[in-house]
Amino acid sequence: MLDLNSISKTFNAGTVNEKRALNGLDLHLQEGDFVTVIGGNGAGKSTMLNAIAGTWFVDSGSILIDGIDVTRLSEHKRATYLGRVFQDPMTGTAASMQIEENLALAARRGQTRTLKKGITVKEREGYREQLKILELGLEDRLTTHVGLLSGGQRQALTLLMATLQKPKLLLLDEHTAALDPKTAAKVLEATDRIVGRDHLTTIMITHNMKDAIAHGNRLVMMHEGRIIYDVSGEEKKKLTVSDLLRKFEEASGGEFANDRMMLN
Amino acid sequence: MNIIALLNSLPGACAQGLIWGIMAIGVFITYKILDLADLTVDGTMCTGGAVCIMMMLSGHSVWLSLFVAFLAGMLAGLVTGVLHTFLGIPAILAGILSQLGLYSINLRIMDNKANQAINVDKYPLLVSLRYIKGVPFYKNTLLITVIIIALLIGILYWFFGTELGCSIRATGSNQNMSRAQGINTDFTKILGLMISNGIVAFASGLYAQYQGFADINAGRGAIVIGLAAVIIGQVLFGKIHGNFAFKLLSVALGGVIYYLVLQVVLWLGLNANDLKLISAIVVAVFLAIPYLKEKHFSKPAKKGGTGRA
């Protein structure tokens, strides 16, 4: 479903701030794979998702989504295939627009936007049903402006928007990191429900190792712009947090996992 | 300080305010909906009038002339949009570049003269300062501008409710989100700038007719007057919970109030040459108020994003 063929990306090339963010990264996902991604700060996790999403173009390598070469496709065109939820709850929704308007925008992802009505009465009823899966009571607040919602509500709504048009690939960039633990758990539950329901191929970045182990069928660890550990199936189920920490130390040559990973 | 003189001048001030209200609706589209400060309008506020007057002088109908003025404004918006999106020039600078370039273009349109007059008795003008009093009601400039504003608000209300219009609103609200939802934000920005400048040029066409001449300096400081109208509308009517059409209406009314206040200030004996300074100060104060309020009078700010679900 997804093929990253030795992609590389260097930021600020030729300056003192030169940063090799992706270093010949290879990753291949089967349809229905739910991969969790862990790694220290600066390992290239978010950079990988941005490369897939097309925030900028990679320096070398190729990106295929379901066999379609998207390497040189602009961000908004790639959006046809992708559902995205960002780390910052403010990023995924339009604050000055209503809940139903946000959903209507998302429902038209990949379609040409014409002079037809921006939202129809019929789809409004559909949204009411869809919002119920989040279990946040948003189904009764269709015309509320998104700016009035809490961070958790906005993340949950973004998740729904990302999956309203079934994407070929769902990209979750630490989408619970900015939420308090209780809310984060709720959003993660909703994630599992939706991913399970639609059998979505998913990549989820997380700093929480327990979450990384508990969710999905595959786990990859990144370090210095490439994948250093890749585990799936039964082997993944048996993983413990201390296994992961040990792996991380081995791979990074004794360099210890950062505080943020430890605390989780 | 003759109160009768003031009262006599009010209908004219209203008419001018309404025309600038149309212009302010154009500014509203970039400033409020797209979240861009577009300075192109200082140029297009002259271009529209120049095109309209020159076309009428060469015998074209008033409606065709206004339509071509609208197109000319859209073209100016297109240039600014392309400079901003494809060439990566910050929006403010892109607008300034277009505006500067337009100065020369406007002169060329006006046959290299700084001023082109049109005689209200010889040409079928749609609006004029002579059509305020003593004309049949259907020719009254006040009525005609009110109808035009009503039509404009109707069209924009419909348009910004369509899929395309919603994508422009989304772009102004959150570009990252828009692109993630497959919206070509370069395209929506250019389209918004074109519509905005088209409306401004249309207003310019009306304003030149109203005054009876097109003038190379007609657009100087137009953005400030437009912003003033937007801000006055927002301050006075923002508390009223209204839909999008009401917001546009309050912008137009903001233009009227701006001109009424101006008239009173003039009547009080202020020098007309000081008006631009006063306008600038008034807009600066209104723009600063929300910031100062936030900084000095707000409760401890809520942290974004960490609220509870």
Image: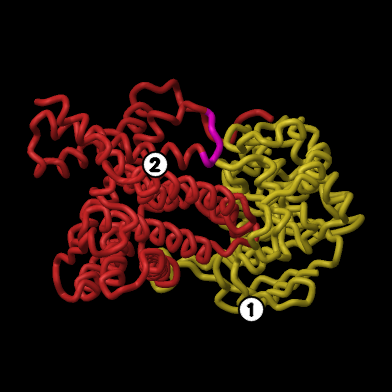
Chain colours: A yellow, B red
Left/right placement of residue A151 relative to residue A16 reads right
Res A69 label: none
Q: Which residue is mark 2?
A: B252
- Of residues B70 and A155, the one drawn nearer to the viewer in this rendering: B70
Name the residue: 82% across, 45% down: A126
Name the residue: 63% across, 33% down: A149
Left/right placement of residue B191 relative to residue B94 reads right
Q: Main secondary structure of the magenta part?
A: loop
Image coords of residue A53 (percent x, y):
64, 64
Q: Which residue is mark 1?
A: A61
Q: In terms of secondary structure, where does tag 1 sit?
A: strand
Is residue A252 in sight in this rendering? no
Query: Measured along the vertical axis of the image, is residue A169 above or below residue A263?
Result: below
Name the residue: 76% across, 61% down: A169
Which region shows up in magenta? B241-245
Image coords of residue B38 (percent x, y):
35, 56
Quarter-wise, where is residue B142 in the image?
top left
Left/right placement of residue B96 relative to residue B64 reads left
Chain of residue at mark 1: A
